[in-house]
């Protein structure tokens, strides 16, 4: 396909005058094989993998920017839904918060803008690990900078998990109360019919870019 001179100038104009960019690139990382009954060992494994993979993502993104001359605004990582990963760990809110801080620290180490996956798929019901993660949200999100969370509460096939919906309503209020200017709520996406692909990155509002 031939590209006309007019099309080239149009692209240049979009880049220079209209801030044309690539909004985001996202790397999905499966952490299931990092699961451990020991919290310290688990945190060590996920930090090592995410910091290494994040740096590789940045290298590839930099190459794309250099090749095409178009800036990439955000670099993101999405991980396996964390509620699945904390199943073997102690049932304490501090456990989930510790994992959240490790994810955040790994993203910072790799210079990744956002890291998603701190969430749970509870449309079919809640395990104790799901409940733990939900209960930890008002503490985990305000304690991190780059962490994003998601919850799926309903689906066409399974219906609505009314227990989870009632619970999350109170959690959102607590999250707003515990975070500066209520911004924590902008880092939590609540869904119905979420894609069950693993990993999954919620599309969050731009208000989290401060």
Image (cartoon, rainbow, N blue to C red):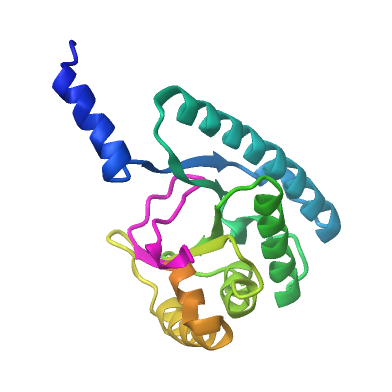
Residue 171 visible from this viewpoint: no
Per the image, is 197 magenta?
Answer: yes
Q: Is residue 1 above or below residue 17?
A: above
Residue at image x 58%, y 49%? 79
Per the image, is 207 magenta?
Answer: yes
Give the camera-side residue of 140 and 42: 140
Left or right of residue 155, residue 145 in this image:
right
Left or right of residue 66, residue 127 in this image:
right
* View extreme (top): residue: 2
**Res. 194 image quadrant:** bottom left
Position of residue 155 measured from the top left corner of the image (x, y, whole percent): 32, 62
Residue at image x 71%, y 64%? 101
Give the camera-side residue of 91 and 55: 55
Position of residue 146 measured from the top left corner of the image (x, y, whole percent): 58, 60
**Res. 82 image quadrant:** bottom right
**Res. 165 image quadrant:** bottom left
Position of residue 73 measured from the top left corner of the image (x, y, whole percent): 44, 46
In the picture, the quarter occupied by the N terminus is top left
How many discs appear?
0
Q: Is residue 70 above or below residue 1?
A: below
Position of residue 130 measured from the top left corner of the image (x, y, whole percent): 57, 68
Give the camera-side residue of 200 and 19: 19
Q: Main secondary structure of the magenta part?
A: loop
Q: Which residues are magenta?
A: 190-210
């Amino acid at each position: 396909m031939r590209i006309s001179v007019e099309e080239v100038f149009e692209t240049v104009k979009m880049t220079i005058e209209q801030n044309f960019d690539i909004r985001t690139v996202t790397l999905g990382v499966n952490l299931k094989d990092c699961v451990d009954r020991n919290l310290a060992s688990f945190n060590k494994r996920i930090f090592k993998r995410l910091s290494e993979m994040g740096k590789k993502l940045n290298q590839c993104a930099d190459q794309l920017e250099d090749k095409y001359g178009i800036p990439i605004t955000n670099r993101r990582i999405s991980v396996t839904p964390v509620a699945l990963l904390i199943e073997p760990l102690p049932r304490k809110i501090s456990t989930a918060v510790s994992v959240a801080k490790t994810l955040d620290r790994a993203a910072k180490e790799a210079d990744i803008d956002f890291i998603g996956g701190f969430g749970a798929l509870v449309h079919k019901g809640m395990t104790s690990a799901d409940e733990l993660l939900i209960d930890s949200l008002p503490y985990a999100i305000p304690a991190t900078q780059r962490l994003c969370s998601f919850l799926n509460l309903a689906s066409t096939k399974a219906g609505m998990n009314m227990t989870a919906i009632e619970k999350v309503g109170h959690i959102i209020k607590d999250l707003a109360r515990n975070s500066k200017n209520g911004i924590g709520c902008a880092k939590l996406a609540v869904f119905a019919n979420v894609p069950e692909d693993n990993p999954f990155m919620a599309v969050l509002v731009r208000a989290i870019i401060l």
